Image: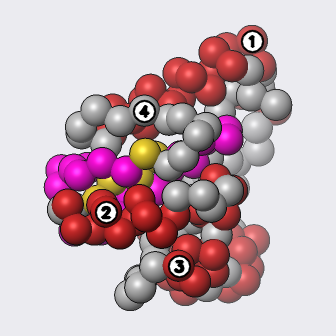
């Protein structure tokens, strides 16, 4: 489980990306109007769930009101489930969800460089991995664009 201090730090960083004041709370999703939000592409609604709390940014007042009314009461974990969100909102496209992992300094154990195996850019395992995921995910990863050895 992520420590409280680490979770609060990560939440502050994501709230900053909203480009307008917003707070993660466990009582309900907080939706704010932020056309300059970095949580999502311009004109989109961005939702971030961390721990048992969620925030969202919307491009305008109308979208913010719809998102607030329709997602309020939905468990935070369901707010990153495309099927659950699609069942409540008229969505034309979804980007995500993305899962990010965080650890604090005490939990991070760097490896010695001798412990890391480097593979050539054209290693067959990378091609196998890219073939197993949807084309959109493979393209977004950028793995096929790497020309240097990778770990």
Observer-nearest of 110 and 50 = 50
Contact, mark 2 vs mark 1 (Cβ under 8 Å)? no
Contact, mark 1 vs mark 4 (Cβ under 8 Å)? no
In this figure, which residue is indicated by the disc labeled 4? 23
Please say if 54 is above or below 64: above
Contact, mark 4 vs mark 2 (Cβ under 8 Å)? no
Q: Residue at x 67, y 56 (%)?
A: 75
Q: Earlier in the sequence, mark 2 or mark 3?
A: 2
In this figure, which residue is indicated by the disc labeled 2? 65
Image side of residue 113 versus residue 40, left or right: right
In this figure, which residue is indicated by the disc labeled 1? 106
Would you say residue 138 is visible in this rendering? no
| Residue count near mark 2 (Cα–Cα under 10 Å), binned few <14, some 14–19, many ≥20 | some
Q: Residue at x 74, y 12 (%)?
A: 106
Q: Which residues are magenta?
A: 31-54
Label 3: which secondary element: helix
Say which of marks 1 and 3 sits in front.
3
Image side of residue 148 versus residue 57, left or right: right
In this figure, which residue is indicated by the disc labeled 3? 88
Q: CA distance from mark 1 to mark 4?
A: 27 Å
Residue 150 at what x, y percent from top left?
61, 51
Residue 50 at what x, y percent from top left?
60, 41
| Residue count near mark 4 (Cα–Cα under 10 Å), binned few <14, some 14–19, many ≥20 | many
Q: Earlier in the sequence, mark 1 or mark 3?
A: 3
Q: Residue furthest top?
A: 106
Q: Earlier in the sequence, mark 4 or mark 2?
A: 4
Observer-nearest of 20 and 103 = 20
Say which of marks 4 and 2 sits in front.
2
Q: CA distance from mark 4 to mark 2?
A: 17 Å
Q: Residue at x 52, y 58 (%)?
A: 72
Observer-nearest of 40 and 123 = 40
Q: CA distance from mark 3 to mark 4?
A: 23 Å
């Amino acid at each position: 489980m992520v420590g409280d201090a680490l979770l609060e730090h990560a939440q502050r960083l994501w709230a900053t990306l909203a480009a307008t004041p917003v707070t993660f709370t466990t009582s309900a999703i907080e939706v704010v109007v932020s056309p300059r939000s970095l949580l999502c592409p311009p004109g989109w609604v961005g939702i971030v769930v961390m721990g048992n709390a969620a925030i969202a940014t919307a491009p305008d007042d109308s979208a913010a009101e719809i998102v607030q009314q329709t997602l309020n009461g939905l468990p935070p974990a369901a707010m990153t489930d495309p099927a659950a969100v699609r069942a409540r909102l008229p969505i034309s496209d979804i980007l995500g969800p993305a899962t990010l992992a965080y650890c604090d300094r005490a939990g991070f154990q760097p490896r010695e460089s001798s412990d890391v195996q480097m593979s050539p850019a054209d290693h067959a395992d990378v091609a196998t991995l890219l073939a197993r995921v949807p084309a959109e995910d493979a393209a977004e990863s950028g793995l096929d664009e790497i020309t240097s050895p990778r770990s």
